[in-house]
Amino acid sequence: MGVASKAWRYSGGLVLNNLDFSIPQQQKPKQHSEKLHFYNCFLGWKWRPTVAVPWTVVCGLMLFAVGLISLFTGHVASDLEWCSQRLVKRTWYYKLGRGSHAPIDIWQSKFSNFYYGCSERGPHFAPAVRERLSNGYLLIATSGGLNQQRTGITDAVVVARILNATLVVPELDHHSYWKDESDFFDIFDVHWFISYLAKDVPVVKKVPEKVMKSMEKPPYTMRVPRKSDSEYYVEQVLPILLRRRDLSLGKTIGSAKECGGLYYFEEADVVQLTKFDYRLSNDLDEDLQKLRCRVNYHALRFTKPIRNLGQRLVTRMRKMAKRFIAVHLRFEPDMLAFSGCYYGGGDKERFELREIRKRWETLPEITPEEERMRGKCPLTPHEVGLLLRALGFENNTYLYVASGEIYGGEETLRPLRQLFPNFYTKEMLAGEELKPFLPFSSRMAAIDYIVCDESDVFVTNNNGNMAKVLAGRRRYMGHKRTIRPNAKRLSALFTARNKMDWSTFARKVKSCQRGFMGEPEEIKPGRGEFHEYPASCICQKPSKYYVVNKNKGDQKFIKVLNVSEPESSNKIFGNEHEKSLLKWKNRTTSTETVPITEDVDHDDFLSD
């Protein structure tokens, strides 16, 4: 187990508010002589170099020329983006889809059938140690809102495993901006949590009384640096957990004291880690990464009242529409103040947000214009609506909006409601059923979490904790369509939208969003936050089989076509899938239809 073993021994003619253009039904695109000339040159001119010139140089020079033309015409050459994409090595499933420039299904990824979530324990993953044989008790104090705390709880389990310690059910944050007094057992099913992780880490509700009485001092409290690696915990935290452990001469760790040539520790075997959010590195052993997934996607199950209400809201949305979009809209006053961005509200907005920003004394002085150019500003509700319409979602699409207090209230939401009249929130769907949860922001957020997770498409206007956690979960649960705004490129488009017609705007938005639609392998493994891109827990089915789901009566059929095997493939299969995959290989020829039983990845998140 590596280090861990050391401790073991978003079209239709709608006029938009504040816009000088409308969304027409049909419109012929303008022809630009410069662009046509480039196409003619590109398609008809035969390149006869006297010396061998790499294709990358040729394509780079042409893109540079187009860039210069774009400066004068005011048009970005988005139609020529494919040229640069030719230089990128595609994986085998993109070849099946006729190239990466093919139209994208805005409701679902056609490549999701090739991947599945896999977080099974590896063959060398040792069973959890018994509580009484562990290296002590680990207390965790989480920080932030619900989803920030969720990442902290997930990482706490992994840290307990690294330290070979017994984890005490984590303490939730009662002092953050939301002032929610909920405890762990008010939000999560604590019994399920403990039992699900029994083979990974011993978990108890509290430190035993006899241990507390035997302690001469309160538990040692410390805060570890952000994104600390496994070695840090072994070298800096483990010694504090160990109590009166003899060490051989010369191996002094932490605050060990010498006695007769031997070293021992006087500290008690209980340690508390505070402000525990993002305190564990993204780069861990594969077994530990899979443990992260088991905790986040299976062990952390909401309480039955939260699950039941969340599922009822999903059912009500499904009764109104076969499919719907969930929009996570972070536009609360504190969120906007923290971002340092300006949203066009004049002096009133500047004053109000500046006063809120004073709560964080360490925040640096920033320029709103620069932050927007860097893509650091959350999209406004109006911009979210424009994004979705430009991507192709019609105005009869049903929206579930998950949000807190919206800065500017209904006035801010009006443009989004005009673009999508079928607009619903948990308050509209639940009514009186929501009353018991109203005083608790984390429980309200948990209800939104369930509906967003069950939606056909999930869209966010920000890159906050809930957006990241849900993006990761939806990848793990089958790459359900998840749209992240490419804020850095979209900000320039939104600023210049009155200078172009709707068809041009929509085309450019679609170009900007390529690579931000929740497709598999949009990002290289190891890049980004693990909670958003759990690459170690997403496995690829055998690439020599092209699987297409078809409904036929009460059975689900798959059509299996032979396709070329990639030069190299990373095949890591879980035990629960291995047998069915072998059957496909043994029972199929070049083309045939095989009835199979539906392989369900058991999602305990919504089960009773």
Image (tube, rainbow, N blue to C red):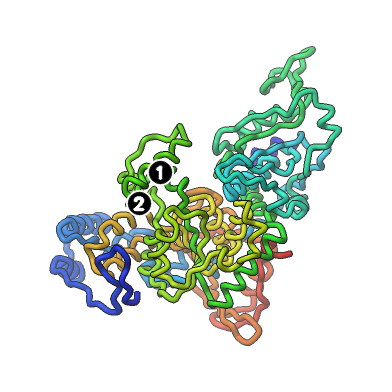
Q: Residue furthest bottom?
A: 553
Earlier-in-chain disc, 2 versus 1: 2
Viewer can see residue 122:
no
Dot 1 amino acid type = Glu
Dot 2 amino acid type = Tyr
Residue at the image point whose x is 22% and y is 74% from the top: 29
Q: Quadrant of residue 35?
A: bottom left
Quarter of the image with the C terminus in it? bottom right
Q: Secondary structure at mark 2?
A: loop
Q: Quadrant of residue 547?
A: bottom right
Closest to the observer, 101 or 412: 412
Left or right, 100 with respect to 37, comes to right
Residue at the image point whose x is 43% and y is 47% from the top: 336
Residue at the image point whose x is 63% and y is 87% from the top: 553
Closest to the observer, 544 or 177: 177
Report x, y in % for residue 570. 55, 58
Crowdedness of circle 1 by 10 Å Cα count: few (<14), some, many (20+)? few
Report x, y in % for residue 288. 64, 47
Report x, y in % for residue 20. 24, 66
Q: Residue furthest top?
A: 260
- Front disc: 2 or 1: 1
Residue that mark 2 sits on: 343
Left or right, 254 with respect to 429, comes to right
Residue that mark 1 sits on: 352
Q: Secondary structure at mark 1?
A: helix
Q: Quadrant of residue 68?
A: bottom left
Quarter of the image with the N terminus in it? top right
Q: Is residue 363 above or below residue 518?
A: above
Q: What whole-number distance in Å separates the C-alpha atoms at marks 2 and 1?
A: 12 Å
Q: Is residue 22 above or below residue 265?
A: below
Report x, y in % for residue 243. 77, 26
